[in-house]
Image: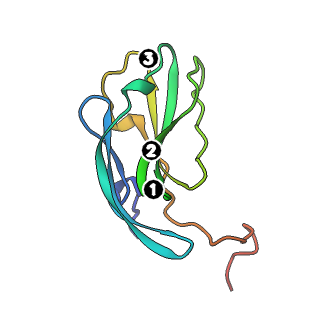
Amino acid sequence: MSTVYVRSLYPLRVEAEDGLKVRVCGGMYEVKGQRRYYRGETGIDLTDYVPQAGKRRVLVYLDVLWNKAKVEAAPATVGFPLYPPIPANGIALAYILLEAGDTSLRETDIEEARVLFEANQGCDPLPCTGG
């Protein structure tokens, strides 16, 4: 049996570009049973989110109302950086760790947030075991 890691899949993947910019690869997603297509975006600049001191996580997400990638930032901290909440109508794509003084991104700064499989609404974790 082979293992496939979510990070290795390209649909809706967030990737580092030059400096503090990221791109989101295109892909397909569903909202309320309707298939939608996202063409992807480049040049999403995270420069304004770099904290003056400490660390901050930002969430790159897909806003399904506008079919556009957006960014949500958590407050900067000197301790463990918090995770920003996923906005309503948003699909989480990746959390990116930014530290004071950053001028570029590394692959290790990007934490996968895409969910490969998700249960349909109204399902409690234990009763949905099939059978």
- Determine crowd level at label 3: few under 14, some 14-19, many 20+ residues with C-alpha closer than 10 A: some
| Residue linked to disc 3 | 100
Q: Give the color scheme: rainbow, by chain, secondary structure or one colour.
A: rainbow
- Determine crowd level at label 2: few under 14, some 14-19, many 20+ residues with C-alpha closer than 10 A: some
**Residue 107 at x, y percent in the picture:** 34, 38
Circles 1, 3 touching at the beta carbon (< 8 Å): no
Q: Which residue is painted at 63% across and 72% down in the image?
A: 120
Q: Amino acid at mark 3?
A: Ala
Q: Name the image quarter holding the N terminus.
A: bottom left
Q: Which residue is painted at 75% across and 69% down in the image?
A: 126
Local secondary structure at mark 1: loop
Residue furthest to the top: 53
Q: Which residue is painted at 51% across and 32% down in the image?
A: 57
Would residue 10 be seen by someone viewing this image from the given angle? no
Circles 2, 1 touching at the beta carbon (< 8 Å): yes
| Residue linked to disc 2 | 70
Residue 3 located left or right of residue 77: left
Q: Nearer the viewer, residue 63 or 4?
A: 63
Q: Is residue 62 above or below residue 126?
A: above
Would residue 91 be seen by someone viewing this image from the given angle? yes
Q: Amino acid at mark 1?
A: Trp
Nearer the observer, disc 1 or disc 3?
A: 1
So how many labels did they put on this image? Answer: 3
Q: Which residue is painted at 36% across and 53% down in the image?
A: 13
Of callouts 1 and 3, the N-terminal one: 1
- Determine crowd level at label 1: few under 14, some 14-19, many 20+ residues with C-alpha closer than 10 A: few
Q: Can you tell which mark lies on residue 66?
A: 1
Q: CA distance from mark 2 to mark 1?
A: 10 Å
Q: Amino acid at mark 2?
A: Lys
Local secondary structure at mark 2: strand
**Residue 64 at x, y percent in the picture:** 49, 59
Q: Nearer the viewer, residue 110 or 20?
A: 20
